């Protein structure tokens, strides 16, 4: 299946294989497995394109969040994990860290961010890491709040993207 167009709108259709051609070059090619093998004229590898497979957006958090599953890999692969935490309401004391955890081919792994100050509104931390994750365990997030006084609040945003 191939077609040429300057703009395309698809509604309620299933495309299982094909290519989008602009001018004389294929700019987006999907193989019979549903994997993009070419995008914007570039040949892709692995899954073709990164896909967001898990995300969380939590506002007005006031306490520690215990380890919570965000995504369980259906296949072993490489994932990009991104975390952003920000003090949304300053208190008179306290700190917060975020932790991501997963299991690779060898061992359970964790990554913990640096600390945000819960006494300063807008204090934030952000990190993006690459992780090899296997199907035997979920990718999880958690936070640790310490010494919170004066009712501080924070927001937490986590994304998991499958790369290969």
Image (tube, helix red, strand yellow):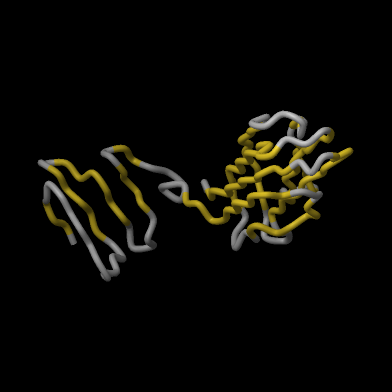
Q: Is residue 148 above or below residue 2?
A: above
Residue at 66 percent across and 37 percent down: it is: 86
Front residue (pair 97, 60): 60
x, y percent for residue 120 = 72, 29
| Left or right of 164, for residue 149 | right
Front residue (pair 130, 127): 127
The quadrant in which residue 41 appears is top left
Q: Is residue 56 above or below residue 45?
A: below
x, y percent for residue 44 = 38, 42
Does any portion of residue 105 appear in the rendered image? no
Q: Is residue 24 above or below residue 92?
A: below
x, y percent for residue 4 = 11, 51
Residue furthest to the right: 147
x, y percent for residue 30 = 31, 55
| Left or right of 91, for residue 12 | left
Residue at 78 percent across and 44 percent down: it is: 109
Residue at 84 percent across and 33 percent down: it is: 93
């Amino acid at each position: 299946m191939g077609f040429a167009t300057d703009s395309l709108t698809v509604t309620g259709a299933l495309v299982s294989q094909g290519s989008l051609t602009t001018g004389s070059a294929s700019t987006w090619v999907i193989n019979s497995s549903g994997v993009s093998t070419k995008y914007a004229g570039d040949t892709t590898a692995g899954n073709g394109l990164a896909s967001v497979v898990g995300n969380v957006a939590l506002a007005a958090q006031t306490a520690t969040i215990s380890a919570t599953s965000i995504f369980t890999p259906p296949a072993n692969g490489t994932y990009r994990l991104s975390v952003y935490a920000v003090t949304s309401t300053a208190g008179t004391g306290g700190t917060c860290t975020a932790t991501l955890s997963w299991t690779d081919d060898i061992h359970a792994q964790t990554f913990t961010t640096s600390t945000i100050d819960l006494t300063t509104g807008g204090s934030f931390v952000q990190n993006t890491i690459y992780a090899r994750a296997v199907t035997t365990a979920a990718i999880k997030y958690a936070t640790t709040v310490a010494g919170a006084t004066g009712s501080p609040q924070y927001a937490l945003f986590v994304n998991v993207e499958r790369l290969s």
